[in-house]
Image: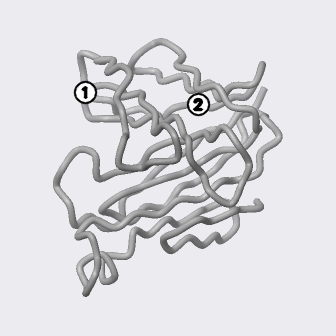
Amino acid sequence: MNLTTYWGKVSQSGNVITLDADEKKAKGPGGDGIGSALTFMEWDGSPLRLTVARTKVWRPEPWADFWFVVRQFCTSDPWPMHYLRVLLDGIEVGHIPNFQAERQEIDVTIGAGDTLRDYPRLTWSAGALHVWHPSLGRTISLGSHFCELGLYLEGCKVDVLVEMESS
């Protein structure tokens, strides 16, 4: 897997990508108290199953977790981006416009009516990342010009197991 990392600590071993928002740096001098990590994975669009295991958490807020992101331009700056965040009771979809991270906007929150225990399946077609979540029973699509998978997190450390879906 080829990764392009913008910030945070990101490493890979086999088909596991570790994203670490770097608690020490986040809580240190000049840190924001949260920390984050962002990387984009080259992807051929084949269906994927991701299993995300949180290995360390230092922020209790629901936003301090793992998000999927897509960007509109392939530049040295990842903005603007659209995102999809899996919550305990649903999914939030939003965007960060005009290259300004501080202007994050929520477009829609979709409730599942139950906790989201299952992990999403990802596909790419027609210029969009499609995220199907079993607990919701529906697909959410994020448009982008680039077939790549953006992985982002805040206030924690996760291991992401990336597996090809069998046909």
Which is nearer the N-term, disc 2 or disc 1? 1
Q: Which part of the image, by quadrant, shows the N terminus?
A: bottom right
Amino acid type at circle 2 is: Arg
Q: Residue at x 64, y 70 (%)?
A: 12
Q: Position of residue 93 (x, y in %)?
A: 42, 27
Q: Secondary structure at mark 1?
A: loop
Q: Residue furthest top?
A: 138
Q: Which residue is mark 1?
A: 89
In the figure, 164 relative to 115: above or below? below
Give the Cα separation between the discs numbered 2 and 1. Answer: 18 Å
How far across and how far down the image is residue 113, in percent?
24, 15
Instruction: Judge by depth and name the residue closer to the eye, 167 or 38.
Output: 38
Which residue is painted at 23% across and 79% down in the image? 27
Task: Identify the residue position indicated by label 2 in the image.
Answer: 121
Quick check: 27 above or below 131? Answer: below
Left or right? Give the position of 161 relative to 67: right
Q: Nearer the viewer, residue 144 or 13?
A: 144
